[in-house]
Amino acid sequence: MPGDVLRFVSGPTPYSSWWLWLAVILLLIVILWYAAVFVATMPADRLRDIPALRDVHARLTRRRFAGGIRHIGERRRRGELSDEQAYDQMSHTLRSFLHQATGLRAQYLHVDEIAAGDLAPAAPLMAALRDARFDTAGSPDPDQLGAQAEELIRSWT
């Protein structure tokens, strides 16, 4: 009897090695999950400073805001938004994009201030959206302005 106990204790483990690999893989998944949550909740200005994440952040930001502009155009075509509401939401989305992409508080800048600074490439479109929203006599094409806004966002560097 004592020999049986000794043989059981000193013998090979009764578990397969794939349990160890499964534990390692699950641990890596948990670590990656926490890292993803940490990065996803990090402020945009910090993401712009991290070289490894800068390009990914910029690409995802452009994609997200270009999709937002497209969605506004779709809602206008379905009749959920008037032209003026669409222009307003496009302007708001474009200003939010500029803030996320550059860190400049574009939401609070006048078009003239935008034209005089680093956001100058966006100034003509911002002026066109402003004029379209408040000038009911003219008839700018909302789809064309939306396409211009999408193109500006997609090509922003």
Image: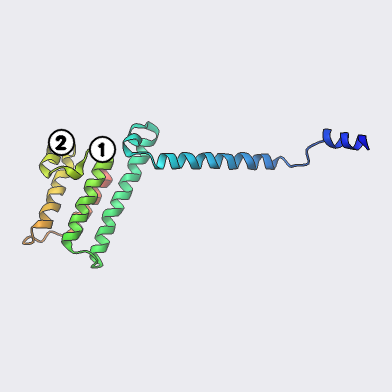
User: Which of label 2 and label 1 is nearer to you?
Assistant: 1
The image quarter containing residue 58 is top left
Specify whether 132 is left or right of 22.
left
Crowding near pointer 1: few (<14 within 10 Å), some, many (20+)? few
Q: Residue at x 90, y 37 (%)?
A: 4
Q: Residue at x 71, y 40 (%)?
A: 17
Q: Which residue appears farthest toward the right when viewing the image?
A: 1
Crowding near pointer 2: few (<14 within 10 Å), some, many (20+)? few
Say which element carries label 2: loop
Q: Quadrant of the N terminus?
A: top right
Q: Which residue appears farthest toward the bottom when viewing the image?
A: 79
What is the C-alpha distance between the residues marked 2 and 1?
A: 13 Å
Q: Residue at x 10, y 42 (%)?
A: 112
In the picture shown, does residue 8 fall above or below 137? above
- The amino acid type found where label 2 is placed reads Gly
Mark number displayed over residue 50: none
In the picture shown, does residue 152 fall above or below 46? below
User: Whole-percent x and y of residue 74?
Assistant: 27, 62
User: Whole-percent x and y of residue 3?
Assistant: 92, 34
Specify whether 76 is left or right of 131.
right
In the picture shown, does residue 87 fall above or below 17? below
Q: Quadrant of the C terminus?
A: top left
The image quarter containing residue 20 is top right
Q: Earlier in the sequence, mark 2 or mark 1?
A: 1
Q: Which residue appears farthest toward the front when viewing the image?
A: 2
Say which element carries label 1: loop
- The amino acid type found where label 1 is placed reads Gly
Q: Residue at x 25, y 58 (%)?
A: 72
- Which residue has dot 2 on it? 117
Specify whether 40 is left or right of 13.
left
- Which residue has dot 1 on it? 103
Q: How many marks?
A: 2
